[in-house]
Amino acid sequence: MIYPWQKLIINHEKLRRIKSGSIAEDVCIEPGVHISGPIKIGSGSILKSGTYIEGPVEIGNDCKLGPNCYIRKFTLLESKVRIGASVEIKNSIIGQDSHIAHLSYIGDSVIGKNVNIGAGSITANLRHDNKNVKLIWRKKLLNTQTRKFGCYIGDNCKLGISTLIYPGIVISDYVLTLPNQIVDKNLQSFTLGDKKLSKEEIKKFWPSRSKE
């Protein structure tokens, strides 16, 4: 089993090996984009003006970045990811089809597929006491052996605006958070805030899930 923080370690080693990088021929890079360090950018991606990237970074196919976003070292954006205005991503993995469109910070975190991060949402990645971050994974308290780890967010989650997430939090698949929710404990699948959703509500929020 690979734990969430170990995925970041593996990604770090993979990106560290990028030396020269590559940019697909059909990538659109608007004036005012800054790129430093090695970077890989897949086909069909768009970098809007004001985007600032510090490699090593890997960006998948058909991604849209900016305007005015900040992508820091050892970040992986899978295909069809949208990173919008005033968003900062640091040392994180962002899954396919996920959107972080407005005014958010994601640090040292693993975000699943088809996740929407509401405007102004922030992941905390450092404890006040500077000790290693711990998290509960499958009912076991585990020490990440690292000072900085943000959160793990599963697939098909939707975070309300201004969601604030403590270090070491695990949010399972199919979770909705409320606007201004402070997430200081793990959230289980098919919940809205702390409330378990009914079958009817699940069909409403995730129509494709009900078909499955």
Image (cartoon, rainbow, N blue to C red):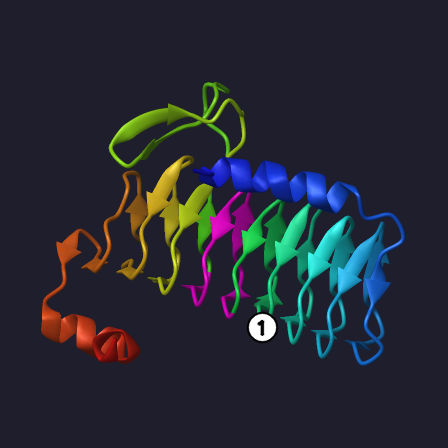
Q: Is residue 210 visible?
A: yes
Left or right: residue 117 versus residue 176 is: right
Q: Is residue 211 above or below residue 1?
A: below
Left or right: residue 53 versus residue 100 is: right
Q: Amino acid at mark 1?
A: Lys
Say few, some or many: other residues with alpha carbon within 10 Å of mark 1 (under 14 / 14 to 19 / 20 or more): many
Q: Is residue 6 above or below residue 118?
A: above
User: Which quadrant of the rendered structure holds the N terminus?
Assistant: top left
Q: Is residue 124 visible?
A: no
Taking the spot 69% from the left edge, 45% from the top edge, the residue there is 74
| Displayed quadrant of residue 162 | bottom left
Residue 197 placed where, x, y %? 14, 63
Taking the spot 66% from the left edge, 61% from the top edge, the residue there is 69
Q: Is residue 131 magenta?
A: no
Taking the spot 85% from the left edge, 56% from the top edge, the residue there is 21
| Displayed quadrant of residue 202 | bottom left
User: Which quadrant of the rendered structure holds the C terminus?
Assistant: bottom left
Taking the spot 53% from the left edge, 60% from the top edge, the residue there is 103
Q: Is residue 102 magenta?
A: yes
- Outermost residue on the front side: it is 1
The magenta-colored residue range is 97-119
Residue 60 placed where, x, y %? 66, 66
Left or right: residue 33 versus residue 211 is: right
Residue 20 placed where, x, y %? 89, 53
Residue on which disc 1 sits: 80
SS for tag 1?
A: loop
